[in-house]
Image: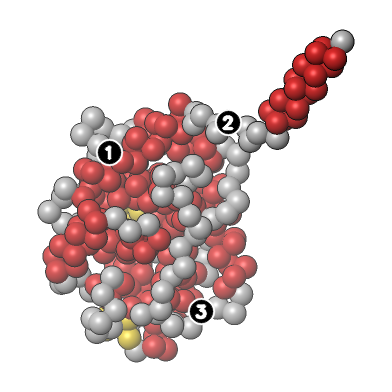
Amino acid sequence: MRGAALLSLVLAVAACERAVEPPPAATPSAAATARRTALERGLAALTAAPALGNVGTAWFLQQLQVRSPDERLAALLARSVPALRADPSIRLIDPSAPPAVLQADPPRGLLRFANYVLAPVGAPPQRAAEFVAALLAPDEQGFVLTHQLLVLIWAEQFGVAVPPDAPALRARLLARIAAEQAAARQPCSDLNAERLAVLYAFGTPLPAEAVGWLDALVACQQADGRWVDATPSQLTYDGQTALAYHEWTHTTGLAVVALSFAPGAATRGTSPTIPSP
Protein backbone atom coordinates (compact mmCIF):
# COMPACT_ATOMS: atom_id res chain seq x y z
CA MET A 1 0.00 0.00 0.00
CA ARG A 2 2.81 2.35 0.88
CA GLY A 3 4.31 1.89 -2.60
CA ALA A 4 0.98 2.57 -4.26
CA ALA A 5 0.51 5.77 -2.23
CA LEU A 6 4.02 6.95 -3.12
CA LEU A 7 3.36 6.27 -6.81
CA SER A 8 0.11 8.25 -6.61
CA LEU A 9 1.95 11.19 -5.02
CA VAL A 10 4.62 11.17 -7.74
CA LEU A 11 1.98 11.13 -10.47
CA ALA A 12 0.09 14.00 -8.81
CA VAL A 13 3.23 16.13 -8.60
CA ALA A 14 4.05 15.44 -12.25
CA ALA A 15 0.52 16.43 -13.26
CA CYS A 16 0.86 19.72 -11.39
CA GLU A 17 4.18 20.44 -13.09
CA ARG A 18 2.62 19.81 -16.51
CA ALA A 19 -0.26 22.10 -15.62
CA VAL A 20 2.04 25.09 -15.11
CA GLU A 21 4.06 24.52 -18.26
CA PRO A 22 3.53 27.29 -20.85
CA PRO A 23 1.45 26.27 -23.85
CA PRO A 24 3.37 25.55 -27.07
CA ALA A 25 3.87 28.50 -29.41
CA ALA A 26 1.13 28.86 -31.95
CA THR A 27 1.99 27.74 -35.45
CA PRO A 28 1.61 30.58 -37.97
CA SER A 29 -1.30 30.08 -40.32
CA ALA A 30 -0.64 29.30 -43.96
CA ALA A 31 -1.97 32.76 -44.89
CA ALA A 32 0.34 34.51 -42.43
CA THR A 33 3.31 32.54 -43.74
CA ALA A 34 2.38 33.46 -47.30
CA ARG A 35 2.24 37.15 -46.36
CA ARG A 36 5.67 37.02 -44.75
CA THR A 37 7.11 35.22 -47.76
CA ALA A 38 5.55 37.76 -50.12
CA LEU A 39 6.97 40.60 -48.03
CA GLU A 40 10.51 39.22 -48.20
CA ARG A 41 10.26 38.54 -51.93
CA GLY A 42 8.87 42.00 -52.56
CA LEU A 43 11.56 43.67 -50.47
CA ALA A 44 14.27 41.72 -52.31
CA ALA A 45 12.90 42.77 -55.71
CA LEU A 46 12.43 46.38 -54.64
CA THR A 47 15.88 46.83 -53.13
CA ALA A 48 17.50 45.39 -56.28
CA ALA A 49 16.16 48.35 -58.28
CA PRO A 50 18.68 51.04 -59.31
CA ALA A 51 16.54 53.72 -57.61
CA LEU A 52 12.97 54.61 -56.74
CA GLY A 53 11.04 56.69 -59.22
CA ASN A 54 8.72 58.53 -56.85
CA VAL A 55 9.34 60.79 -53.85
CA GLY A 56 6.17 59.63 -52.11
CA THR A 57 7.30 56.01 -52.27
CA ALA A 58 10.69 56.99 -50.85
CA TRP A 59 8.99 58.88 -48.00
CA PHE A 60 6.90 55.85 -47.06
CA LEU A 61 9.96 53.62 -47.13
CA GLN A 62 11.88 56.10 -44.98
CA GLN A 63 9.21 55.68 -42.29
CA LEU A 64 9.57 51.92 -42.58
CA GLN A 65 13.35 52.16 -42.36
CA VAL A 66 13.17 54.25 -39.18
CA ARG A 67 10.94 51.65 -37.54
CA SER A 68 12.56 48.50 -38.92
CA PRO A 69 16.09 49.16 -40.21
CA ASP A 70 17.21 47.08 -43.18
CA GLU A 71 20.59 47.46 -44.87
CA ARG A 72 19.14 46.75 -48.31
CA LEU A 73 16.44 49.38 -47.88
CA ALA A 74 18.93 51.90 -46.55
CA ALA A 75 21.08 51.42 -49.64
CA LEU A 76 18.08 51.83 -51.97
CA LEU A 77 17.08 55.07 -50.25
CA ALA A 78 20.65 56.35 -50.43
CA ARG A 79 20.63 55.74 -54.19
CA SER A 80 17.19 57.22 -54.66
CA VAL A 81 17.57 60.63 -53.02
CA PRO A 82 20.13 61.89 -55.58
CA ALA A 83 18.12 60.34 -58.42
CA LEU A 84 15.01 62.27 -57.34
CA ARG A 85 16.79 65.57 -56.71
CA ALA A 86 14.99 67.39 -59.56
CA ASP A 87 11.54 66.56 -58.15
CA PRO A 88 9.96 69.71 -56.63
CA SER A 89 8.78 67.65 -53.64
CA ILE A 90 12.30 66.42 -52.82
CA ARG A 91 12.12 68.13 -49.42
CA LEU A 92 9.79 65.33 -48.27
CA ILE A 93 12.77 62.97 -48.20
CA ASP A 94 15.58 65.53 -47.87
CA PRO A 95 14.58 68.23 -45.36
CA SER A 96 17.76 70.16 -46.17
CA ALA A 97 16.38 70.96 -49.64
CA PRO A 98 14.82 74.43 -50.05
CA PRO A 99 11.01 74.76 -50.06
CA ALA A 100 9.27 74.62 -53.43
CA VAL A 101 7.88 77.95 -54.63
CA LEU A 102 4.08 77.68 -54.82
CA GLN A 103 2.27 79.46 -57.63
CA ALA A 104 -0.03 82.24 -56.46
CA ASP A 105 -2.86 81.07 -58.72
CA PRO A 106 -2.18 77.52 -59.98
CA PRO A 107 -4.01 76.33 -63.11
CA ARG A 108 -7.26 74.49 -62.67
CA GLY A 109 -7.65 70.74 -62.92
CA LEU A 110 -4.94 68.22 -62.16
CA LEU A 111 -2.19 70.85 -62.15
CA ARG A 112 -3.98 72.53 -59.27
CA PHE A 113 -4.07 69.20 -57.45
CA ALA A 114 -0.32 68.79 -58.01
CA ASN A 115 0.31 72.24 -56.52
CA TYR A 116 -1.86 71.48 -53.49
CA VAL A 117 0.00 68.20 -52.87
CA LEU A 118 3.27 70.16 -52.98
CA ALA A 119 2.06 72.64 -50.35
CA PRO A 120 3.48 70.90 -47.22
CA VAL A 121 7.02 71.42 -48.56
CA GLY A 122 6.26 74.72 -50.29
CA ALA A 123 6.50 78.43 -49.61
CA PRO A 124 5.42 81.04 -48.74
CA PRO A 125 3.94 79.62 -45.51
CA GLN A 126 0.59 81.39 -45.71
CA ARG A 127 -0.01 80.16 -49.24
CA ALA A 128 1.04 76.65 -48.23
CA ALA A 129 -1.54 76.64 -45.42
CA GLU A 130 -4.24 77.94 -47.78
CA PHE A 131 -3.47 75.21 -50.31
CA VAL A 132 -3.57 72.50 -47.63
CA ALA A 133 -6.93 73.76 -46.37
CA ALA A 134 -8.31 73.92 -49.91
CA LEU A 135 -7.31 70.32 -50.65
CA LEU A 136 -8.73 69.02 -47.38
CA ALA A 137 -12.09 70.79 -47.62
CA PRO A 138 -14.13 68.66 -50.08
CA ASP A 139 -15.01 64.96 -49.88
CA GLU A 140 -12.87 63.19 -52.47
CA GLN A 141 -12.15 59.64 -53.58
CA GLY A 142 -9.39 57.44 -54.97
CA PHE A 143 -5.90 58.89 -55.19
CA VAL A 144 -7.16 62.32 -54.17
CA LEU A 145 -8.61 60.87 -50.96
CA THR A 146 -5.38 59.06 -50.00
CA HIS A 147 -3.42 62.21 -50.76
CA GLN A 148 -5.70 64.29 -48.57
CA LEU A 149 -4.56 62.18 -45.64
CA LEU A 150 -0.92 62.24 -46.73
CA VAL A 151 -0.95 66.01 -47.22
CA LEU A 152 -2.38 66.43 -43.72
CA ILE A 153 0.40 64.22 -42.30
CA TRP A 154 3.09 65.98 -44.32
CA ALA A 155 1.81 69.43 -43.32
CA GLU A 156 2.03 68.47 -39.65
CA GLN A 157 5.52 67.05 -40.21
CA PHE A 158 6.82 70.23 -41.86
CA GLY A 159 5.09 72.70 -39.59
CA VAL A 160 2.49 74.01 -42.06
CA ALA A 161 -0.67 75.26 -40.39
CA VAL A 162 -3.52 72.72 -40.53
CA PRO A 163 -7.24 73.07 -39.76
CA PRO A 164 -8.01 73.15 -36.01
CA ASP A 165 -10.00 69.90 -36.26
CA ALA A 166 -7.02 68.03 -37.76
CA PRO A 167 -7.25 64.95 -35.45
CA ALA A 168 -10.95 64.47 -36.19
CA LEU A 169 -10.32 65.13 -39.88
CA ARG A 170 -7.58 62.51 -39.93
CA ALA A 171 -9.95 59.95 -38.39
CA ARG A 172 -12.68 60.78 -40.93
CA LEU A 173 -10.28 60.46 -43.84
CA LEU A 174 -9.07 57.07 -42.62
CA ALA A 175 -12.65 55.88 -42.20
CA ARG A 176 -13.51 56.98 -45.73
CA ILE A 177 -10.41 55.25 -47.14
CA ALA A 178 -11.35 52.03 -45.31
CA ALA A 179 -14.92 52.22 -46.61
CA GLU A 180 -13.67 52.77 -50.15
CA GLN A 181 -11.29 49.83 -49.81
CA ALA A 182 -14.11 47.60 -48.59
CA ALA A 183 -16.08 48.35 -51.75
CA ALA A 184 -13.11 48.11 -54.15
CA ARG A 185 -12.92 45.36 -56.76
CA GLN A 186 -9.43 45.88 -58.24
CA PRO A 187 -6.96 44.20 -55.84
CA CYS A 188 -4.07 44.37 -58.34
CA SER A 189 -4.20 48.13 -58.86
CA ASP A 190 -1.70 50.67 -57.60
CA LEU A 191 -4.55 52.46 -55.85
CA ASN A 192 -5.29 49.28 -53.90
CA ALA A 193 -1.67 49.10 -52.70
CA GLU A 194 -1.73 52.81 -51.79
CA ARG A 195 -4.92 52.51 -49.75
CA LEU A 196 -3.55 49.48 -47.88
CA ALA A 197 -0.24 51.22 -47.16
CA VAL A 198 -2.08 54.21 -45.72
CA LEU A 199 -4.53 52.11 -43.71
CA TYR A 200 -1.97 49.76 -42.18
CA ALA A 201 0.59 52.47 -41.48
CA PHE A 202 -1.79 55.03 -39.99
CA GLY A 203 -5.20 53.45 -39.42
CA THR A 204 -5.98 51.35 -36.36
CA PRO A 205 -8.15 49.50 -35.67
CA LEU A 206 -9.11 48.11 -39.04
CA PRO A 207 -12.27 46.17 -39.94
CA ALA A 208 -12.25 42.39 -39.74
CA GLU A 209 -12.15 42.03 -43.53
CA ALA A 210 -8.79 43.82 -43.68
CA VAL A 211 -6.86 40.52 -43.44
CA GLY A 212 -8.62 39.40 -46.61
CA TRP A 213 -7.42 42.56 -48.33
CA LEU A 214 -3.84 41.51 -47.61
CA ASP A 215 -4.41 38.00 -48.92
CA ALA A 216 -5.76 39.47 -52.17
CA LEU A 217 -2.69 41.72 -52.37
CA VAL A 218 -0.38 38.72 -51.95
CA ALA A 219 -2.20 36.93 -54.77
CA CYS A 220 -1.33 39.84 -57.09
CA GLN A 221 2.42 39.45 -56.60
CA GLN A 222 4.30 38.45 -59.74
CA ALA A 223 6.72 35.54 -59.99
CA ASP A 224 9.72 37.89 -59.77
CA GLY A 225 8.49 39.37 -56.47
CA ARG A 226 7.19 42.65 -57.88
CA TRP A 227 3.73 44.16 -57.80
CA VAL A 228 2.68 46.10 -60.89
CA ASP A 229 -0.24 48.41 -61.59
CA ALA A 230 -2.35 45.91 -63.52
CA THR A 231 -5.43 48.14 -63.65
CA PRO A 232 -4.56 51.86 -63.70
CA SER A 233 -7.15 53.96 -61.88
CA GLN A 234 -8.65 57.27 -62.88
CA LEU A 235 -7.48 60.42 -61.14
CA THR A 236 -10.13 63.12 -61.11
CA TYR A 237 -9.77 66.60 -59.64
CA ASP A 238 -11.34 69.97 -60.28
CA GLY A 239 -13.24 68.76 -63.34
CA GLN A 240 -10.31 67.03 -65.06
CA THR A 241 -9.75 63.26 -65.31
CA ALA A 242 -6.76 61.20 -66.43
CA LEU A 243 -5.52 57.66 -65.99
CA ALA A 244 -2.88 57.46 -63.27
CA TYR A 245 -0.02 55.24 -64.39
CA HIS A 246 2.59 54.19 -61.80
CA GLU A 247 5.85 52.38 -62.37
CA TRP A 248 6.46 49.12 -60.55
CA THR A 249 8.61 50.47 -57.70
CA HIS A 250 5.69 52.65 -56.60
CA THR A 251 3.23 49.74 -56.46
CA THR A 252 5.79 47.33 -55.00
CA GLY A 253 7.01 49.84 -52.43
CA LEU A 254 3.48 50.48 -51.17
CA ALA A 255 2.70 46.75 -51.05
CA VAL A 256 5.86 46.22 -48.98
CA VAL A 257 4.78 49.00 -46.61
CA ALA A 258 1.30 47.52 -46.22
CA LEU A 259 2.62 44.03 -45.47
CA SER A 260 5.30 45.38 -43.13
CA PHE A 261 2.79 47.20 -40.92
CA ALA A 262 0.21 44.41 -41.01
CA PRO A 263 -0.47 42.22 -37.95
CA GLY A 264 1.87 39.27 -37.82
CA ALA A 265 4.48 40.76 -40.15
CA ALA A 266 8.08 39.93 -39.40
CA THR A 267 8.76 43.64 -38.93
CA ARG A 268 5.52 44.37 -37.05
CA GLY A 269 5.51 47.51 -34.92
CA THR A 270 3.43 50.50 -34.03
CA SER A 271 2.31 53.19 -36.44
CA PRO A 272 5.21 55.40 -37.48
CA THR A 273 6.06 58.50 -35.53
CA ILE A 274 6.81 61.06 -38.21
CA PRO A 275 9.97 63.03 -37.37
CA SER A 276 10.06 66.78 -37.76
CA PRO A 277 12.50 68.07 -40.38
Q: Which residue is mark 3?
A: 162
Q: Amino acid at mark 3?
A: Val
Distance between the alpha carbons at the discs numbered 1 and 2:
29 Å
- Sequence-earlier tag: 3 or 1: 1
- Residue 113: % across, % down: 35, 67
At label 1, the amino acid type is: Arg
Mark 3 vs mark 1: give the one in front: 1
Dot 1 falls on a residue whose secondary structure is: helix
The label on residue 41 is 1
Question: Which residue sits furthest right?
Answer: 1
Residues tagged 1 and 2 counted as in contact (Cβ below 8 A): no
Circle 1 packing at 10 Å, graded few (<14), some (14-19), many (20+), is some
Residue 11, horizontal then vertical, whole percent: 75, 20
Residue at the disc numbered 2: 24
> Are there few (<14), some (14-19), or many (20+) residues within 10 Å of tag 3?
some
Position of residue 103 in the picture relative to residue 168 (left or right): left
